[in-house]
């Protein structure tokens, strides 16, 4: 029993250290990004959206419509996957013979 407690504590300690390292990296990246745009959060978000391809300048209305339609299809697929899972979580569980 004591070795299980020690092993659990060691595991959570390792997870905490890894989480702290990732958190420190994320904080450092955020501060570095903000300092490169003169501490303007909106400018940093704009640069992020441009770098990830979320902001485009479209040549024609058809290009823009095609982009929006693609996003619409992705939202529909996500809904068709998420809704049955959500519905199943709302449905009450059937009583079994051992519950009686």
Image (cartoon, helix red, strand yellow):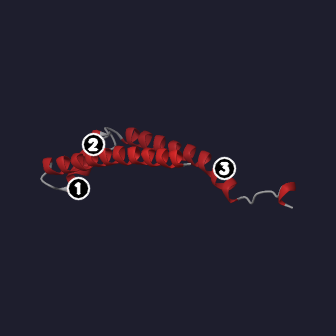
**Residue 47: which quarter of the image?**
top left
The image shows residue 60 at horizontal and vertical percentages of: 34, 39
**Is 36 rendered above or below residue 97?**
above
Where disc 2 sits, the SS reads: helix
Circles 1 and 3: CB atoms closer than 8 Å:
no
- C-alpha distance separating marks 1 and 2: 12 Å
The label number, if any, that marks residue 84 in the structure image:
3
- C-alpha distance separating marks 2 and 3: 35 Å
The image shows residue 88 at horizontal and vertical percentages of: 69, 53
Instruction: Residue at 83%, 59% (x, y): give it.
Output: 99
Out of 80 and 6, give the one closest to the viewer.
6
Q: Dot 1, crowdedness within 10 Å: few (<14), some or many (≥20)?
A: few
Q: Residue furthest front?
A: 2
What residue is pinned by disc 2? 50
Where disc 3 sits, the SS reads: helix
**Is 92 rendered above or below residue 48?**
below
What residue is pinned by disc 1? 42
């Amino acid at each position: 029993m004591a070795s299980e407690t020690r092993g659990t504590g060691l595991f959570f300690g390792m997870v905490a250290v890894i989480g702290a390292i990732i958190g420190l990296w994320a904080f450092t990246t955020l501060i570095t990004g903000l300092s490169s745009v003169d501490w303007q959060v909106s400018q940093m978000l704009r640069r992020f959206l441009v770098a990830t391809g979320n902001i485009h300048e479209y040549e024609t209305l058809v290009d823009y419509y095609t982009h929006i339609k693609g996003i619409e299809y992705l939202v529909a697929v996500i809904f068709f996957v998420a809704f049955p899972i959500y519905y199943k979580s709302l449905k009450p569980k059937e009583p079994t013979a051992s519950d009686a």
